[in-house]
Amino acid sequence: MTTDTIPETNLPHISSQDPDVYKYIAAEQLRQEYTLELIASENHVSPAVREAAGSVLTNKYAEGYPGRRYYGGCEFHDSIEDIARDRAKELFNCQFANVQPHSGAQANAAVFFALMQPGGDTFASLVLSDGGHLSHGMKINFSGKYFNPVHYPLNYDLETDNYEHIDYDAVRDVCLEHKPKMLLCGYSAYPRIIDFKRFREIADECGALLMADIAHIAGLVAGGVHPSPFPHAHIVTTTTHKTLRGPRGGMIMTDDEDIAKKIDKSVFPGMQGGPLMHIIAAKAVAYGEALDPSFKAYAAQVVANAQALASALVDHGYRLVSGGTDNHLMLVDLRPKDENLTGADAETWLEKAGIITNKNGIPRDPRPPMQTSGLRLGTPALTTRGLKEDQMQTVADWIDTVLTSKGDTATAATVRDEIRALCEQFPLPH
Ligand code: DSN
């Protein structure tokens, strides 16, 4: 990057004090401005959320909870955390919210250590390679090291309509066999509606607590375009930065007072020390935005865009895992289009053209995780910048052009110029 390409960043202090760091922040701003962000777990926050995250609240220790802190000077922090908790409860229609987890994985860890005994207790979940999350039982993650995961399968019966959907009968069978203490639902790469009511019936039948990790779909739940895990789940965890469009962070919610007490203790002092109060303020601001009626339209457009993109990709000859999408993401199986094309190559070639994605294993993928046969695409970030169904057709055409050209440099340059022109028409929120 040359200095004449450094954009206006409104960061005068870093710019004059620390040009080494500044130039990369500026470059990143430029990258975000002029590329299409299709990573399903990313989004563009509002300037108000960014201001809160960059505020003086970062200076303060506030260990404890509102009204019960271990440090003086927390008066305003109490008010901010109360606003964040109240807005979270209103947004998700639940009784208790802990807004202190630094991330989704830490939120999940806090729940596991609050409600299960390490070293023995069993939980049931979807395996990472089928669309689950590493904190749902991966062997080298805390969840697989300290607890005993058993996994329920997707439906792999090609004769049925719901191939590669959650197989609820199989969930029930696994739970009745292993009697897990907790049943987990909610995923990182699953494009279909989750039937929380059915999960709760299974949890009740086998005596398990139901935990829903809605990290990916929280914004869709808040916007009313995906069914809510409440009142079915005993515990709900989420991240705050994906479809919910807040700062990077986590949250835990419940309707059960006993569970809420255990969760609070498990987050602090169990897992964490001082809460990130600047991030809690940014969560409060983001929840305020999500409570605005305009957020419902945003969430509906995210899904409409995903469905438009999915259908245009199918028209180009790609296969979608489970046959399509009901939410913000899709998993593209690249093999029917080109048997030799890997997710890793697709990710690299698309990035050269200004389309940012991530390679992703597809269920029963014969390739290893750093290669993969699939690509995960999502529409939350494109929808934030104002793109609609018409542009999704164009995005699918660009993806196909780049992949069909096998990463040809001239093709990538042409597409990149066209994308820049589109990005200029749909600037990021500043
Ligand atoms: N890494 C996140 C994602 O991309 O889905 C999940 O934590």
Image (tube, rainbow, N blue to C red):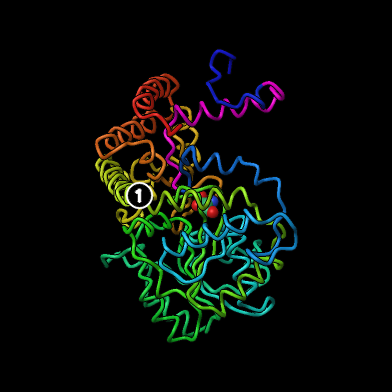
Residue 20 drawn in magenta: yes
The one of 155 and 297 positioned closer to us in this rendering = 297
Q: Residue furthest top?
A: 4
Q: How many labels does the image show?
A: 1
Amino acid residing under circle 1: Phe
The one of 405 and 79 positioned closer to us in this rendering = 79
Residue 201 occupies quadrant: bottom left
The percent coordinates of residue 413 (x first, y second) are 42, 20
The one of 174 and 303 positioned closer to us in this rendering = 303
The percent coordinates of residue 143 (x first, y second) are 62, 67
Does residue 144 appear in this view? yes
Q: Residue furthest right?
A: 71
Residue 78 vs 14, above or below: the answer is below
> Residue at (36%, 62%) from the top-left corner?
164
Q: Is the magenta stretch mostly helix, strand or loop?
A: helix
Which region is colored magenta? 16-40
Question: Is residue 88 shown left or right of residue 325?
Answer: right
> Residue at (66%, 70%) from the top-left corner?
266
The one of 256 and 140 positioned closer to us in this rendering = 256
The percent coordinates of residue 317 (x first, y second) are 28, 42
In which quadrant will I find the N terminus?
Answer: top right
Say which element carries label 1: helix
> Residue at (40%, 52%) from the top-left corner?
290
The percent coordinates of residue 52 (x first, y second) are 56, 43
Residue 254 vs 332, above or below: the answer is below
Residue 387 occupies quadrant: top left
Residue 138 drawn in magenta: no
Query: Pointer 1: what residue?
Result: 295
Question: Is residue 350 shown left or right of residue 81?
Answer: left
